[in-house]
Image (cartoon, rainbow, N blue to C red):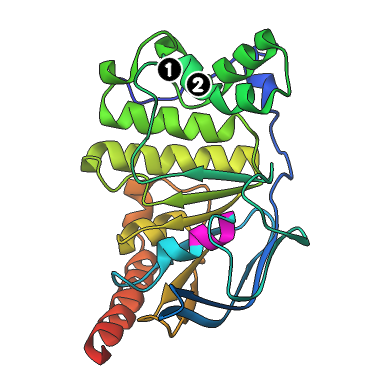
Amino acid sequence: MDCGIPTSPSGSRFETFPDDRSGGAAFHVDGVDFAYDGTHPMFRSLALSARPGEFVALLGPSGCGKTTLLNLLSGFLPPDSGRITIDGETVTPEMPALGYVFQSPQLFPWLDVLDNVRFGLRMAGRLPEAEQRDKALAALALVGLDAAAGKFPHQLSGGMQQRVALARALVLEPRLLLMDEPFAALDAITRATLNEELLRLCGRLGQTVLFITHDVEEAVFLADRVVLLDIAPAGIHSELTIDLPRPRRLRETRRLERFTALTDTLLERISAIVAAA
């Protein structure tokens, strides 16, 4: 499979997603407490924010609350106390600002690729069907899969399926993209390719991103800032600004001494958390 992203001449469907949009949303988590069933606390007085267009990676040992935090930010879980806002509005699951990419693609096997991508547009009923299809094709073109529009999920590789899931999120033009280990199940080559594609897309479209990963090097490569969670319910252990130059290419970036230094810093902090548990 050719993992490259095709370019597009002026006047093509790519103009559905114009360059240099300042489309990112700011989010704020203010003094949030949350416990499952009221007896298993995950967060106490949690505070976290992101500026528009910032790429934040979320790291931490298993059980520290990474996915719980994404579910709180998406509105899937209500906080027990405190407030979560996106651009000043209290978060709800149906907010158009939100896009969510899960650990697995979760595509509908009975729909072809195009209809999987336009599913959210169809449910929202915001556009005529022809415009929905045009936008879905444009989103597929962004991730290099417009030629696969008529295929079904079982005909695609795992990496292609995850690109369809990304297109399904992007077609709704969210201002905050929540990503829960979206590339964890992929092979190393496909994962590296999708990391670079994700940076290219976010640089073009301008979304704010909160990205969960267990891979320290992936976090350093992608992020503007890495947030490290402590064992629940301690919340945030520390944060680290990633001051690597952009644009980033994986091979070149991983050779930088600064990349190694940042990775080592995070590994030391994670080791300290595990040792203290």
Q: Is residue 158 visible?
A: yes
Determine the main secondary structure of the stretch shown in magenta. helix
Q: Secondary structure at mark 2?
A: helix
In the image, 76 versus 178, the foreground residue is 76
Quarter where residue 169 is shown: top right
Residue 3: x and y, percent? 34, 26
Residue 196 as seen in the image, left or right of residue 23: left
Q: Secondary structure at mark 1?
A: helix
Label 1: few (<14), some or many (≥20) within 10 Å?
Answer: many
Q: What is the magenta range?
A: 70-74
Residue at (64, 38) in percent of width and height: 205
Quadrant where the image shows the N terminus: top left
Q: Are marks 2 and 1 in contact (CB under 8 Å)?
A: yes
Q: Relative to residue 228, is residue 136 depicted above or below?
A: above
Quarter where residue 74 is shown: bottom right
The CA span between labels 2 and 1 is 9 Å
Three-letter amino acid code of the residue under disc 2:
Leu
In the picture as drawn, the residue positioned furthest to the right comes out as 88
Q: How many marks?
A: 2
The numbered mark at residue 140 is 2
Residue 131: x and y, percent? 69, 13
In the image, 84 versus 207, the foreground residue is 84
Residue at (68, 46) in percent of width and height: 95
Label 2: few (<14), some or many (≥20) within 10 Å?
Answer: many
Quadrant where the image shows the C terminus: bottom left
Give the mark nearer the N terminus: 2 vs 1: 1
**Mark 1 lies on residue:** 113
Q: Relative to residue 32, is residue 86 depicted above or below?
A: above
Residue 215 as seen in the image, left or right of residue 132: left
Three-letter amino acid code of the residue under disc 1:
Val
Q: Relative to residue 78, is residue 119 depicted above or below?
A: above
